Structure formats: C-alpha cells, structure tokens
Image: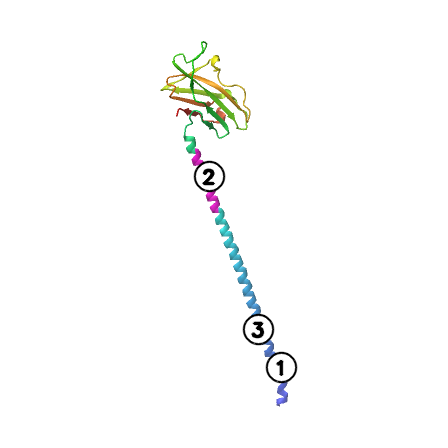
Amino acid sequence: MTNKALAPIGIALVALFGLTACEDTTSGEVTSNDDDSTEEVEETEETQEAEEVEEENEQLAEEDEEAEEEAEEVEEEVETSSERPTFGDTYTYSDGLAVTISEPEAFTPGEYAFGGEEFEQHVMFDVTIENNSGEDYDPSMAYVTASSGGAEGDSVFDSDSGLGGTSTTTVTDGQSTTWQEGFGVNDPADINVEFTDLDFELMRESVLFVSE
C-alpha cells in the first residue's frame, strides 16, 4: 500500500486507542469514588456503634448506682428497725400507721380502781395512734401489755384516772386518737411496754418500747 492509503488506518487506530484510554481513566475515577463512599459509611456505622455501646455502659453504670443506693436504704431501714423505740419515740409501720408511747408516770389508783392490787407501785402513760395508712383503723384491735422488774405488769382500770381501756371509735385516714393505759409494776424505772395489733390479716409486727 501507499502511504496515502495507510494514513486513514493510522488515524483510526490513534482515535481508537485514545477512546480506550479515556474509558480506562473514567472507570478508574468511578472506582476510587465508590471506595471512599464505602469507607465513609463504615466509619459512620462504627462511630454509631461506639456511641451506642457508650450509652449502654453509662445506663448500666446509672442502674448499678441506683441499685447501690437502694441497697443502702434497705440496710439503713433494717438497722433502724432493729433498734427498739424508747418512751416518747414514734414507731411507724410500713403502711403509715404510727404508734407513740409516752414516758410512764407514777399515779395512785382511786378507791374504785380495778387491777394491779398486788403491786405497790403504779404507772400510767399515753398511747397515741396516728393513722396515715390510707384506710380506716379500728383502735379496739390494739393490745398493750407491760413488764417491769422481771414480772408481768397488771392492767389497772380506773375511771377517776381516765383509765377506761383503749379507744373504740374508728380512726379515719389522716386522723389520730389517744388514750391512757395504767399498770401495777415492780420497778417504775425499768418498764417495757409492748404494742400489738390484733388484726392479724394486716400482719403488723408487735413493737416493744423500752426505758432508756
């Protein structure tokens, strides 16, 4: 062939090689962009996972702290409940019913008093019930006993001294009632008074008030 005949073929080949080179370059750039996008997505997912793990750890730490505080509160309640109340203290049940026994005072039974005759010394004290249980309370279910100097005390009923037994009127929620109890005792300086709720369905424990 002559040089004139080969010229068009050479031009065509140059054009073909040029298009191929362009396609390779374009293809390479697209592939590079895909890799960058994938890496960014992976980094974002890893960051989110790390943040979620951190939040979970913080939540677990808060729950542990709350559990420790609750355990400390329970421990304090146990320690408090194990200490016996003394006269003048108020013992409050978990349902909100509160009982107070005042300091016993010496008294002399009247002519028509009944009970405690075998004792030479007698004491009387106030029993106060404050009802914050959310329910009505029947004070006639209260039973009070006393011991002194190693012996059980004997209840004294004396209208002249206001010793007529427990209150009988229902105490509504938010209200209170007070009555007097009297006992013949061996030693007025050594007295224990026990309060018992005879409504056993409510499962209230007996409370022992002691001398200081």
Can you give x and y, in whole percent of width and height, for residue 90 in the image?
46, 27
Q: Earlier in the sequence, mark 2 or mark 1?
A: 1
Which residue is tagged 1? 12
Measuring 51% from the left and 25% from the top, which residue is drawn there?
Answer: 130
Mark number displayed over residue 70: 2
The residue that label 3 is drawn on is: 25
- Report x, y in % for residue 89: 45, 27
Gap between marks 2 and 3, in whole Å?
Answer: 68 Å
Residue furthest left as drawn: 150
On whether residue 66 falls in the magenta region, the answer is yes
Q: Position of residue 35 (x, y in %)?
A: 54, 65
Mark 2: amino acid:
Glu
Residue 10 colored magenta?
A: no
Image quarter hosting the C terminus:
top left
| Above-or-below relation of 127 to 39 | above
**Dot 2 surroundings within 10 Å: few (below 14), some, or many (20 or more)?**
few
Residue 72 appears in view: yes
Q: Are marks 1 and 3 in contact (CB under 8 Å)?
A: no
Q: Is residue 80 above or below residue 181?
A: below
Residue range of the region highlighted in magenta in the rendering: 60-77
Q: Secondary structure at mark 1?
A: helix
Residue mark closest to the camera, 1 vs 3: 3
